[in-house]
Amino acid sequence: MDADCIERRESISIEEFVECFLEPNKPVVLGATLTKHWPARSDWVTSEGKPDFARLTELYPTDLVEVADCDTTYFSDHQRTTMPFPEFIEKWQKGEHRLYCKDWHFTRSPSQYRAYQPLPHLSDDWLNTYYQEEKNDDYRFCYMGGQGTWTPFHEDVFRSYSWSSNICGQKRWILVPPGQNHLFTDDQGNWVHSIVDYNEARFPRLHELKKYELIQGPGET
């Protein structure tokens, strides 16, 4: 299935979003105009549309982040290391491996910098409300990486409804509709690590997988 199967909306009411996409569990891309006032859209990006490494380091000088090496495999994930955010930025600029900052709880940063405000369509966040009140935790993450960084095949936390806004660059998404577990599970019950580069002997029917592919541009959600 190509990206034409996924609707793109530059504007949409909350009621229409819930009725047409949230309740039927259909993916949708919301246009960049909805995030144009976010501080991150200007503070994190240069006038040329590239990551503003100096500004990012200035904003988050003391944060510790988990960094995945996308050239490695560790069980169902990549090998991860914890390092200071400025160190990650330095390694990223040097092009050391394909390093991907993942699952960074940046809204809890000591800097208290507020990078965004959830769109009204997505502000009814029961999962984070519970975790913030009961667990002193959250599921608001930031991901950063250069060309070729990626996440292994997975499902989102608690199989919940998730949304993702892209601040800079382009991100390729491959979305798999439910009901196809038998195609990406081997005889040991393990899921495929990557659905674009895999062992055909272990996953002989993976080529039958129905999926959506799309490119998410800057500012899109």
Image (cartoon, rainbow, N blue to C red):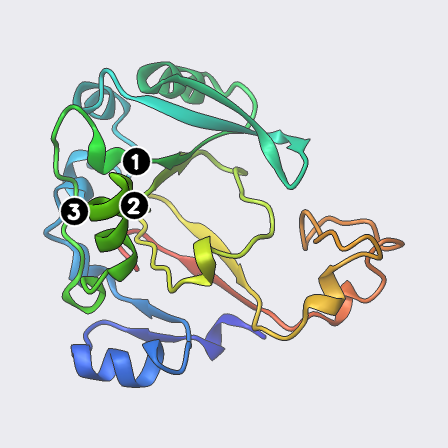
Q: Quadrant of residue 30?
A: bottom left
Pinpoint residue 21: horizontal percent, then vertical percent.
34, 79
Task: Examine the rendered structure and indicate whether residue 71 appears above or below residue 90.
Answer: below
Question: Regarding mark 3 in the picture, which secondary structure is present there?
Answer: loop
Pinpoint residue 45: horizontal percent, then vertical percent.
23, 36
Question: Regarding mark 1 in the picture, which secondary structure is present there?
Answer: loop
* Marks 1 and 2, the one that precedes in the sequence: 1
Q: Which mark is residue 116?
A: 3
Q: In the figure, is residue 192 to the left or right of 146?
A: right
User: Is mark 2 in CB contact (under 8 Å) with mark 3?
Assistant: no
Q: Quadrant of the C terminus?
A: bottom left
Q: Looking at numbered disc 1 in the image, what kind of residue is underneath it?
A: His
Label 2, residues with CA under 10 Å away: few <14, some 14-19, many ≥20? few
Q: Quadrant of residue 40?
A: top left
Task: Examine the rendered structure and indicate whether residue 146 appears above or below residue 211.
Answer: above
Q: CA distance from mark 1 to mark 3?
A: 13 Å
Between residue 62 and residue 130, name the one nearer to us: 130
Between residue 42 and residue 122, name the one nearer to us: 122
Q: CA distance from mark 2 to mark 3?
A: 11 Å
* Marks 2 and 3, the one that precedes in the sequence: 3
Seen from this angle, which residue lies furthest right? Answer: 201
The residue labelled by disc 1 is 105
Q: Looking at numbered disc 2 in the image, what kind of residue is underneath it?
A: Arg
* Marks 1 and 3, the one that precedes in the sequence: 1
Q: Looking at numbered disc 3 in the image, what kind of residue is underneath it?
A: Tyr
